[in-house]
Amino acid sequence: MGTTNEKLARIKRELNEVPTLPGVYLWKNAEGQVIYVGKAKQLRARMRQYVNFQDERAKIPLLVDQIESFDYIVVENEHESLVLEKNLINQYSPFFNADFKDDKSYPFIALTKGDVFPAIIYTREKHTPDTKYFGPYTDSRAARNMVDIARRVVPLCAATCSDWRQLTRRLEKDNLALLKHDARPCFDAHVGLAPGACCGAITPEAYQENVRRIERFLSGHHQEFLEELQSEMQEAAQELDFERAGRIKARIDTINSLTDKQHAVSTRNLDADVVGFYREETVAGVHVFMVREGRIINSNEFILNRGKDVPDDDLLHMFLLRYYDATTSIPHEIIVRESPEDVEAMQEWLTEKLDSVHGAKVRFTEPKKGEKADLLTLAENNAKHTLLRYKVRTNYEDKRINDALLQLESALALDTPPMRIECFDISTIHGSYTVASMVVFTNGKPDKNQYRRFKIKTPLTEANDFLSMQEVMRRRYNPQRMADERFGSKPDLIILDGGKPQLNAALAMFQEMGINDIALCGLAKRDEELFVPWQDSGPVVLPSGSASLYLVKQVRDEAHRFAITFHRELRGKGMTASLLDEVAGMGPVRKKAILKHFKSFRNLKHASLEDIKAAKVLPNEVAEELYKVLQQYNREERRSKR
């Protein structure tokens, strides 16, 4: 197979023959498996971005490392490439394309429109010709309930009815079976859930009208349907057909009771899907509100793999392809935080699926304020809870942590999984208020009782993270501290934020102290690379999107947060003291008294002159001088924030 450089050179030569036309490309590994499918307006330029590493997505280096060959398919336009991309992703399920975490089949409500008397059915089957599907539903109970409600509103045969199946088989063999079938109605026809196709009580033409109505009902268009039923009820009453009027009234009540349970979200006749995302490193939650006629008629939730390892646009693009390929319920508007990059092609594809007789088009919107923006925020909050429920239900965190610790053990050549990890970070401004943080993760989780923070005592005239790190190593790992139970047990792994320079500084201090039994690594901020003492050829690169990389980032971010918090605290106290020292007549006693009265410097800096004088701890001339100094400080602070 040759070296990596030789392989890339070969692929680059082969790319010279790729046309500059729109199409779909397929990257393949050494076994010939399709590992990624993408589309492009200009195939050659887009594919070159991968092998030239001009694509900044985190997964690209790992993807390119596995590429051995490629295929491409030329199409006429971007719309065709979108449809082809969707079909190829469904066919190959490539590893590097974002996908549903739980790739199960979701429930649908279907109408078997290929039959003379189409039936309604709850199903998880893959789409088949001549069948219209409504969904997907992520709540199977809600889907089954909707089948029952729909049949109470519009009588229709159920595919589970044995009489309907017998009638359908007879019709497939003999078109004249309609003239010969039994006059005995099935149970559903007795109770009003079916129109009596089995006993000749309804013609195929009248039955098709029921099918048309139930399609509109399942699509969420209830108001127009209600108006039709109310008109029919009044007509039946005028004809003194009170039995029929009563049946229609029961259907109207069913729709009204359903509408009462649906959450009204818009004063307008809003017809939209609202798509909210909540992302973590290795997984993402999605919540979709289906809003029809200004009401949420259904909400669906999904879990996607890849999480933050995939850019927002890619994740949204892949979800929209999968979701709207599966459903026939296409809205006029899709509300998202940010439209996909290929928004025009996506709108064209969805408009084609909508197939409106009135020529309506599908559009994406990105609301910044108002009820649509509020709906989007609500969907995002629900997506967060979707992800939380999934993690609790599947014991996701524990599994991920176990995987992460085992992966770190292997990648860093440790003797055992790092059950206790200590991470250090330095925070300073030009050598002033220099502090260090130590955070501890025990069994892969933050152990906040073990956190420690250090004021750097080494005199510094400018920032020197290496000297600061050496001081912290000496103070933390000297024999007295190592024997101190308050600092816990010896760590299995030390992570130093700052990469190879910080690692070298710590190693020099450990050599001076005679420590050689604690594993260390330096984490480079830019590319999330881990530098280790035993490897001179380069850093250890954890797989993009892996549990181990997520844990390392989490540890590093927590150390950074803890250091920054302590640094700001010290700096704030120092700035407060120096500011009050500028006030003529403000000695230590008065300084302590005025801060005690206002409880914090924040309250003091927003106080009026009258408030300061009312405290009665300062002479009037000192209070006036303090007020002037505070006003000047506030003006400079506002200016710095502009």
Image: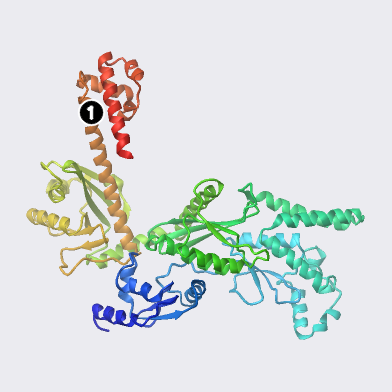
Residue at the spot 68% in from the left edge and 49% down from the top edge: 260
Residue 479 position in % (x across, y down): 12, 49
| Residue situated in front as seen by the camera: 638 or 392 | 638
Residue of label 1 = 579
| Residue situated in front as seen by the camera: 605 or 457 | 605
Residue 140 occupies quadrant = bottom right
Q: Is residue 329 visible?
A: yes
Residue 467 position in % (x across, y down): 12, 49
Q: Is 123 placed left or right of 600 in the picture? A: right
Residue furthest to the right in view is 240
Residue 58 occupies quadrant = bottom left
Residue at the spot 10% in from the left edge and 53% down from the top edge: 509
Q: Amino acid at mark 1?
A: Leu
Can you say whether 512 is above or below 205 in the image? above
Residue 104 position in % (x across, y down): 52, 69
Q: Quadrant of the C terminus?
A: top left
| Residue situated in front as seen by the camera: 277 or 452 | 277
Q: Is 270 placed left or right of 196 in the picture? A: left
Q: Quadrant of the N terminus?
A: bottom left
Helix, strand or loop at mark 1? helix
| Crowd band around label 1 with a 10 angstrom C-alpha radius: few (<14), some (14–19), many (20+) | some
Q: Is residue 100 visible?
A: no
Residue 551 position in % (x across, y down): 32, 58
Residue furthest to the front in view is 20
Residue furthest to the bottom in view is 173
